[in-house]
Amino acid sequence: MKTNSPSRSAFFNARLLIGFALCSVGVLPALAGFSESVTGTPATEAPAQTRGTWIPTGSLATERYGHTGTLLPNGQVLVAGALDLVSFASAELYDPATGRWSATASMVTARANHTATLLLNGQVLVAGGADASAELYNPATGLWSATGSMATPRYAHTATLLPNGQVLVAGGHGDSNYLGSAELYDPATGLWSATGSMATVRFDHTATLLPNGQVLVTGGFGKTGDYLASAELYDPASGLWSATGSMATPRYHHTGTLLPNGQVLVAGGFNGDYLTSAELYDPATGLWSTTGRMAAARYEHTATLLPNGQVLVAGGFNTVGGALASAELYDPATGLWTEAGSMATPRFGPTATLLPNGQVLVAGGFGKTDYLASAELYISDGSGELTLERAASRKTHGTKGDFDITLPLTGGGIECRSGLTRYTTVFTFNAEVTGADRAVSSCGTVSSITVDPANARNLLVSFNGATCNAQTVTVTLTNVHDTLGNTLASASASMGLLIGDVIGDGKVRNQDIENVRSVLGQQTNSSNFRDDVTLDGRINNQDLQTVRSHRGDVLP
């Protein structure tokens, strides 16, 4: 059934009323065209046991729906904005070490149904949700600052971090119309520029960065009141969109998750019916194939890729149960779903964030009758769980030994040292490992994968990065094996490679030169090793000249 385009306020109000829908008396969600029925049948392969456990954690200070959740390089989670009858600007930080939330500075502009993107420099770009404005959150200061505005106001759009460090924003809902336009944000200038428009206007779609650097957009709600099955590809090299295979089932408010094998899992959503179905997109062929169905139909749920390569789907809404507490796990190896326990509180529209310890933080959303401030943690049962705990870039400084630059698993670490063009990324796991099937680098050539003789929990990946300066380099391992026979499907770590950036702010400038000058003559130690950019074990004029020669270089 087709619907007319709702206004922005009507669209938000319709979502609110969903929480009050009482299926027992036949009250349906208020957005025109919603249907009572649920498609598909429950999966018959349901397991006899439940995988994983949910536990409560600290509650937000403010009830939130339409908010964003972003894992910061320091391991904390930034939650910003939300809708509670009106949009608001407040933000909070979750500390996994304490399980508590703390206030941080409020955004410049109140917003909901916006996007939040972690940039390569460690700041968070928030865009849209209220108007065309955008702003940046600096974790180092806890403050927000305005940045360039988009050309078009939008909400319910997508934002994707591209390999070159720019952010692609696509589609969404404008002041009074659905959008097909797209824009690029450049962190180096703080400005937006137009790029190619999609062939189909859409909002509440998904956008997934593929391993080849292209962006896959799927589904959503279209111009003529249609639920969409179409999909498109954005090519950053040309700035153009092209059609690709359509899904078997139209859907919006679904999820899209990149799997370790490079395929994309799309699950659930709504198209007049609430959906249990799931599909897989293969970038190699541009085609979709069906895969196992979820046990529960759901939309406005979350989907999180776990360290073991499985996908955790949690919460959502359907007319059978209203807001859902149930969770399921998708296993790419079998194409089947299994139960993953239930949250204490049913909710739809929460945020879900994978923490560095492998747990998943689910926060806020809308419950059976009201907005939620509660938060919960999903803890895997450990079956086959090999997880990446941390990563670092390692260099040897003459006779002074090895020094590591920590690489936060969310990005943001900067390798500033030169010396030989050989770089080593250290992957540290929660168990002793025996090796990996493959390693690739987004720049340079991998030369070896070895187990660290000093610590069997470390895998050392060496690559030649002679041409990689002033670039972000991502090293990815495939099929990491531990001594117990467990396998981690994929593990990756990224770093900005910028020779001479001893301060680590993404630019080589006079402050870096002064920093090296202040420690001239010192032997390399744990407090000054970044200044020893030539790796000879002491800070001298050679280091000073190397930094000077790179003055003006910046990360994209």
Image (spheres, helix red, strand yellow):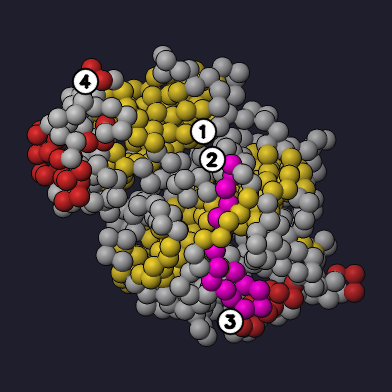
On residue 8, the disc is 3
Relative to 509, 281 lies left or right: right
The quarter of the picture where the N terminus appears is bottom right
On residue 306, the disc is none
Name the residue carrying label 1: 389
* Sequence-earlier tag: 4 or 1: 1
* Sequence-earlier tag: 2 or 1: 2
* Residue at 78% from the left image edge and 51% from the top image edge: 344
- Depth order, front residue of 171/451: 451
Dominant secondary-structure state across the stretch colored magenta? strand
Q: Label 2, label 1: how many angstroms apart (C-alpha)? A: 6 Å
Residue numbers of the magenta segment: 82-97
Amino acid at the residue labelled 1: Glu
* Sequence-earlier tag: 1 or 3: 3
Name the residue carrying label 4: 398
Q: Within the magenta stretch, is there residue 295?
A: no
Q: Residues within 10 Å of mark 2 (few under 14, many from 20)?
A: many
Q: Secondary structure at mark 1?
A: strand
Query: Does the residue at mark 2 contact the one at mark 1 (Cβ under 8 Å)?
Result: yes
Viewer can see residue 352 = no
Q: Label 4, label 2: how many angstroms apart (C-alpha)? A: 32 Å
Residue 367 screen position, x and y as percent: 75, 64
- Of discs 1 and 3, which sits in the foreground? 1
